[in-house]
Image (cartoon, grey):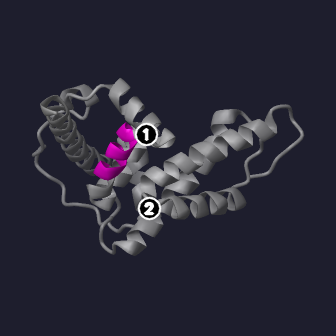
């Protein structure tokens, strides 16, 4: 990431590095690997700090996500093979809307924020993410943290894992619904345990 002389450029670069670190940690689950990934992203992606903020950050996000997927795919060969198309959803929800799984956008934001701060809620999300298959983890992070749609998510999976055949938006959607069902179940169990204590 290049740092220019425009006002606020250094601050924008620092904020971007922090965001990329959080994203890398959620994707990879290992803080040392996350830091190494951010460093390689910062070295590889030329971001003009004077460019419109979203445009500059988006290039770095895509690079980081695709590189993380490539690393996850190397660690777990075959984990990012595109699944067979299903005739219909076979998960606990038919809609990929968070509310359909009994999860609010505010709950997701709170869990992600807690993960960054390292408190108890954050460790619960990290533990849950660690239990997911790599493709579910990558899709969940892209959809909920970055807010990417299924098509963008599928393209990142295909490029990062060099998947052939490539992922479709429908496949990404189905795997996301599976992750939402898993998270909803996890939240219900955690709440039941909290109430029982």
Residues drawn in magenta = 120-128
- Residue 193, given in percent of the width and then of the height, sits at 16, 37
- Left or right: residue 45 versus residue 180 is right
- Left or right: residue 167 versus residue 190 is right
Q: Report the residue marked by disc 2.
A: 69
Quarter holding residue 42 = bottom right
- Residue 128, given in percent of the width and then of the height, sits at 28, 49
* Magenta span includes 163: no
Which is more toward the observer, 94 or 113?
113
Q: In this orientation, does residue 71 appear?
A: yes
What secondary structure prevails in the magenta region? helix
Dot 1: element: loop
Image quadrant containing the C terminus: top left
- Left or right: residue 24 versus residue 172 is right
Q: Report the residue marked by disc 1.
A: 119
Q: Residues within 10 Å of mark 1 (few under 14, many from 20)?
A: few
Quarter holding residue 58 = top right
Q: How many marks?
A: 2
Dot 2: element: helix
């Amino acid at each position: 990431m290049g740092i220019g002389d425009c006002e606020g450029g250094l601050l924008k670069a620092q904020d971007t590095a922090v965001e990329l670190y959080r994203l890398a940690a959620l994707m990879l689950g290992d803080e040392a690997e996350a830091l190494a990934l951010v460093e390689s992203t910062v070295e590889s992606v030329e971001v003009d700090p004077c460019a419109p903020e979203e445009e500059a950050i988006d290039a770095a996000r895509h690079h980081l996500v695709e590189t993380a997927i490539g690393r996850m795919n190397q660690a777990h060969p075959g984990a990012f093979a595109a699944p067979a198309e299903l005739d219909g959803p076979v998960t606990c929800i038919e809609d990929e809307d968070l509310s359909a799984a009994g999860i609010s956008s505010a709950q997701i934001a709170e869990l992600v924020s807690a993960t960054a701060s390292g408190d108890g809620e954050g460790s619960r999300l990290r533990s849950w993410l660690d239990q997911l298959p790599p493709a579910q983890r990558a899709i969940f992070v892209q959809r909920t943290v970055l807010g990417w749609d299924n098509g963008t998510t599928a393209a990142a999976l295909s490029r990062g894992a060099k998947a052939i055949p490539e992922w479709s938006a429908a496949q990404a959607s189905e795997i996301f619904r599976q992750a939402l069902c898993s998270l909803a179940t996890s939240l219900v169990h955690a709440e039941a345990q909290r109430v029982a204590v």
